[in-house]
Amino acid sequence: MCKGLAALPHTCLERAKEIKSKLGTLLQKPESAIDLIIPYPEKPEKPAKAQKPSPEEAWQWRNSLEKLLQNPYGLASFRNFLQSEFSEENIEFWIACEDYKKIKLPAKMAEKAKKIYEEFIQSEAPKEVSGYNFCFPLNQVNIDHFTKSVTMKNLVEPSASTFDLAQKRIFILMEKDSLPRYVRSDIYQELIK
């Protein structure tokens, strides 16, 4: 029979309160316009024009999402393809995670983690990463409940690996679902001619 919170050791209750407090601080809505200034642009800046790959190099992408994403032209091409299908949320999440890993300052890391959380993970986020949103079914990134839960725990003390599990799950999803569609697309077929 459940004895409630009184049955838990005092240290567990204290730790739970500490975690709740940290999550509450991280997830608070900004109260002033200054808090809205986050060093993460809504639209990524356009990189210097990437060099078109040789057909041989592009051919290698059909079996390696990693090689595709490492190539600036490949990444841009893949992203354009996904946008044309209204399914760019997975690649946007993956890119946001890559950008996040480059941050060194803890304060900036916490700001970026909050932004990623609000955009992709929290319930009813514009590009929510779990569950199914009946209002915006095309803007869903799909991760399971366990992955979302682990990511939420990682947000208590953000580190470079906060989103690693979620990013890995999205990579696998893109590798199994999006890459085969991309390889069959006219965009890709033009590259390997």
Image (cartoon, rainbow, N blue to C red):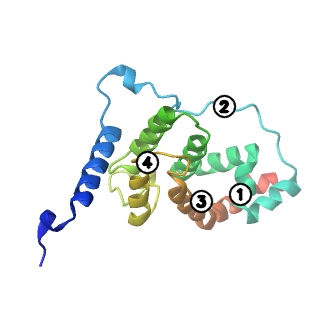
Residue at the image point whose x is 77% and y is 57% from the top? 189
Q: Amino acid at mark 3?
A: Phe
- Residue contact between numbered discs 1 and 3, judged by CB atoms under 8 Å: no
Alpha carbons under labels 3 and 2: distance apart = 23 Å
Residue 45 position, x and y percent, is: 62, 30
Going from the N terminus, do you reach mark 1 or mark 3 first?
1
Residue named by callout 4: 120
Q: In the image as oriented, which residue stretches furthest toward the bottom? A: 1
Alpha carbons under labels 4 and 2: distance apart = 22 Å
**Residue 46 got which mark?**
2
**Residue 171 got which mark?**
3
Depth check, mark 4 against mark 2: the one in front is 4
Q: Amino acid at mark 4?
A: Phe
Q: Element type at marker 3? A: helix
Q: Is residue 79 depicted above or below 45 in this figure?
A: below
Depth check, mark 1 against mark 2: the one in front is 1
Alpha carbons under labels 4 and 1: distance apart = 22 Å
Residue named by callout 1: 66
